[in-house]
Amino acid sequence: MRASIFVLALAAALANAPLTARADVVPKFDVEKSCKAEIADTGGVGETLASCMNDEEQARKELTEHWGEYANDDKRACIGETASAGMPSYVELVTCLEMASDIKKRSKDQ
């Protein structure tokens, strides 16, 4: 059920994404700000600023390596969705792009 809701939300985001997000380069996010906010929201349970920053850096490296493999419309949509709350995250961007790719692959297989 939870996955279905997320897929529907992702589909809506992809359909209504702003066209102004650039898809030619990996965006630059202030992940330190995002990590600090996340840690504050969770009370720091299970994560430190250093571990959050490491996760974000690993996700950014993954994006840099695979950026050309993602469809431009998915990149624009996911950048817009990820940055919409004012706390952008490379981890969330990777997740969004992978889900968008999976949705397209499943559509082609059916």
Image: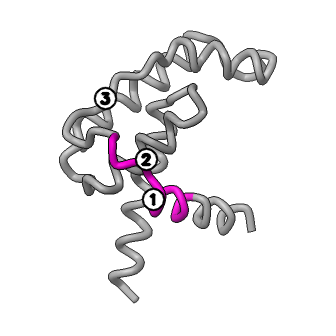
Q: Which residue is mark 2?
A: 78
Res. 67 image quadrant: top left
Q: Where is the C terminus found, in terms of image quarters?
A: bottom left
Side (left or right) of 88 relative to 69: right
Q: Is residue 82 magenta?
A: no
Tag 2 secondary structure: helix
In this view, the residue in front, 9 or 42, is: 9
Q: Residue at x 60, y 66 (%)?
A: 8
Tag 3 secondary structure: helix
For the record, the magenta segment spans 10-20
Rate crowding at label 1 as few (under 14), some (14 to 19) or many (20 or more) other CA atoms within 10 Å: many
Q: Which residue is mark 3?
A: 61
- Answer yes or no: do the residues labelled 1 and 2 have beta carbons within 8 Å? yes
Name which of mark 3 and mark 1 comes first in the sequence: 1
Above or below for 108 versus 64: below
Distance (Cα) linking label 3 and label 1: 23 Å
